[in-house]
Image (tube, rainbow, N blue to C red):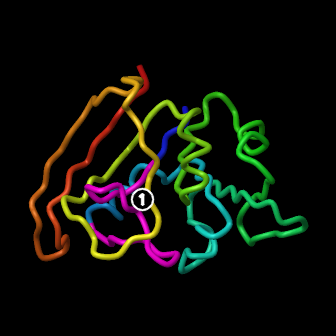
Amino acid sequence: MITIIVAIAENGAIGYKGDLIYHLSADLKRFKQLTTGNTVIMGRKTFQSLPKGALPNRRNIVLTRQKDLSFPGAEVYSSLDEALTHCTRDEKTYIIGGAQIYILALQLADELEITLVHDTPVQADTFFPEFGSDESWHLVNREDHDADDRNPFPYSFLTFRRN
């Protein structure tokens, strides 16, 4: 099972200058809850942006085309296809970014776990790829939440599965 997990703005924005646009407490808790005990696959820049390195209690896989790179607590592969050959069929695998990895994974994913932030950022330079226009995805769960003291914008947790 391959699942893409991402927080996106209403205009599809996911990042600016190499960082996430949104840091909602509820989104970070949900990310941890879903990915703990599972495999996470990410690009090199995403891994290097993690404040404490490899995510604990998860199998961390980093994709990079740079030869001879290694990262503490992570396996390194040169492509998404290569990384997936090292994952078992019963392994729950989450694609956690960045944008180029999302583009590659979207055609392979079984599920999308999206936090839709009901906002449009003033500045963004990285966007999640278009999906669903071919009706290959259907919404199976939606939870709407209001803004609060720990989450400055209203947001929705959306789960899509491939038809």
Q: Residue at x 34, y 57 (%)?
A: 8
Residue 98 shown in magenta: no
Give the crowd class for mark 1: few <14, some 14-19, many >=20 residues within 10 Å: some
Which quadrant would the C terminus be assigned to in this image?
top left
Does residue 123 sit above or below 103 in this rendering? Answer: below
* Residue 74 left/right relative to 112: right
Q: Which residue type carries mark 1? A: Lys
Counting from the top left corner in percent of width and height, residue 18 is at 52, 75
- Who is closer to the viewer here, 116 or 89? 116
Q: Nearer the viewer, residue 86 or 111?
A: 111
Please give the name of the residue rendered at 14% of the width and 49% of the height, measured from the top-left corner: 144
Q: Which residue is mark 1?
A: 32
Residue reaching furthest right?
Answer: 68
Residue interval drawn in magenta? 5-25
Question: Would you say 13 lies left or right of 49 here?
Answer: left
Q: Is residue 10 magenta?
A: yes
> Where does the image place residue 131, in percent across and percent down from the top left?
41, 38
